[in-house]
Image (cartoon, rainbow, N blue to C red):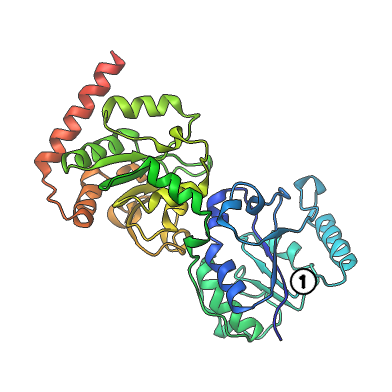
């Protein structure tokens, strides 16, 4: 039996969480030809028809009344159950990418032959009896492919999303914005306000100045609305580029296209990291509170610097410029000396003092 109608549930509104699904969606569409994939979320919004449209993945939206205003779990379950019954088993397979047991119990009421969720040790999967053969993971969408194949007893190979699907005009725009070589990217802002994943911009500036000393050009991925942040970076790194401010085609897909013009990139755990990671450009990912093995599942070429491993701390600020430059110098095949780093840090601190006084 070929699964035709698939529902993927994801709770949050963050674009990075949807980009993490690209490999899973592409693998399903390739391994199950003709399948129809829908998503459901609490916001009843479809980023695949909005911010992520230029990635050209065919995904529709299924609206359920998931809103928190429904109140108790009992009322939510009742509502979902009634709505799914009215659909006459619209879906053959439901894949739940949420970590909450409560949300998983609610979603389990959607009528479908197959349910897949890693929550509660796979106990809510349907049909039962596959727990011992499923791969343990922490909501790794790429690892889900093998488990879903086992659950539905269909061969599905894991396939990375091909960036050739992106609108060609964006690659042309990326070439216009970054026409030469020797660019190194920096993603410095996070979209998720509840997780402290940031790294001080002063340290990014220090690393960027190291990049300048290697005869390369720093490229910062910063939205136009963050003018004060760009000014702060520009004061410390005069040669820095901000390509998204010089185009009318700014979008997540353009960021991915721009990534193909980079020699490497340094990034915190954020949505831009996932956009950059769709390319094969080497990334250095800085991690503190988040789990790298879960959040970087779709990224082929990432070098992880984890404060939990290096400093036994979830505080990303424990990571130093030297930690980053040591890895970056290996990627760029340059020499990183502590004296060079010291000079950079001193100069940056001097500029900061000049600005504040």
Q: Position of residue 96 (x, y in %)?
A: 65, 65
Q: Position of residue 292 (x, y in %)?
A: 41, 59
Farthest residue to the top: give it: 357
Give the vertical position of 139 relative to 16 (above or below): below
Label 1, on which residue? Answer: 91
Q: Out of 111 and 166, give the one closest to the viewer.
A: 166
Q: Position of residue 283 (x, y in %)?
A: 34, 55
Q: Out of 307 and 174, give the one closest to the viewer.
A: 174
Quarter the N terminus occupies = bottom right
Quarter the C terminus occupies = top left
Label 1 crowd (10 A; few <14 / some 14-19 / many >=20): many
Q: In the picture provided, is 224 more to the left or to the right than 74?
A: left
Give the vertical position of 83 relative to 347 (above or below): below
Residue 185 makes an appearance in the image: yes
Q: Out of 228 and 29, give the one closest to the viewer.
A: 29
In the image, what residue occupies the spot 47% across and 58% down?
295
- Residue 222 picture quarter: top left
- Residue 123 picture quarter: bottom right
In the image, what residue occupies the spot 63% across and 82% down?
151
In the image, what residue occupies the spot 44% across and 26% down?
227
Label 1 sits on a secondary structure element that is: loop
Q: In the picture provided, is 170 more to the left or to the right than 105?
A: left
Residue 289 makes an appearance in the image: no
């Amino acid at each position: 039996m070929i699964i035709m109608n698939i529902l993927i549930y994801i709770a949050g509104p963050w674009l990075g969480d949807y980009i993490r699904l690209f490999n899973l969606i592409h693998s399903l569409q390739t391994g199950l030809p003709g399948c129809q994939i829908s998503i459901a979320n609490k916001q009843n919004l479809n980023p695949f028809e909005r911010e992520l449209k230029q990635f050209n993945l065919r995904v529709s939206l299924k609206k359920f009344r998931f809103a928190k205003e429904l109140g108790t779990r009992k009322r939510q379950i009742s509502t979902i159950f009634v709505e799914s019954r009215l659909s006459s088993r619209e879906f053959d397979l439901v894949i739940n990418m949420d970590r909450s047991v409560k949300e998983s119990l609610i979603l389990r009421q959607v009528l479908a032959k197959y349910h897949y969720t890693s929550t509660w040790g796979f106990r809510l999967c349907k049909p039962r009896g596959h727990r011992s053969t499923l791969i343990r993971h922490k909501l790794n969408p790429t690892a889900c492919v093998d488990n879903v194949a086992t659950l539905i007893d269909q061969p599905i190979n894991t396939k990375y999303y091909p960036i050739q699907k992106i609108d060609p005009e964006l690659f042309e725009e990326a070439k216009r914005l970054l026409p030469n070589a020797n660019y190194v990217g920096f993603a410095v802002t996070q979209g998720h306000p509840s997780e402290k994943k940031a790294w001080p911009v002063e340290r990014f500036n220090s690393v960027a100045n190291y990049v300048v000393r290697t005869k390369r050009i720093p490229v910062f991925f910063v939205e136009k609305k963050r003018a004060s942040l760009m000014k702060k970076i520009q004061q410390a790194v005069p040669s820095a580029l901000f390509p998204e401010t010089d185009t009318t085609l700014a979008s997540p897909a353009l960021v991915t296209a721009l990534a193909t013009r980079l020699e490497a990139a340094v990034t915190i755990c954020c949505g831009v990291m996932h956009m950059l990671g769709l390319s094969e450009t080497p990334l250095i990912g800085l991690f503190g509170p988040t789990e790298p093995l879960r959040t970087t599942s779709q990224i082929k070429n990432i070098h992880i610097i984890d404060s939990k491993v290096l400093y036994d701390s979830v505080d990303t600020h424990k990571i130093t410029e030297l930690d980053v430059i040591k890895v970056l110098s290996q990627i760029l095949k340059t020499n990183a000396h502590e004296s060079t780093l010291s000079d950079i840090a001193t100069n940056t601190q001097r500029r900061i003092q000049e600005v504040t006084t």
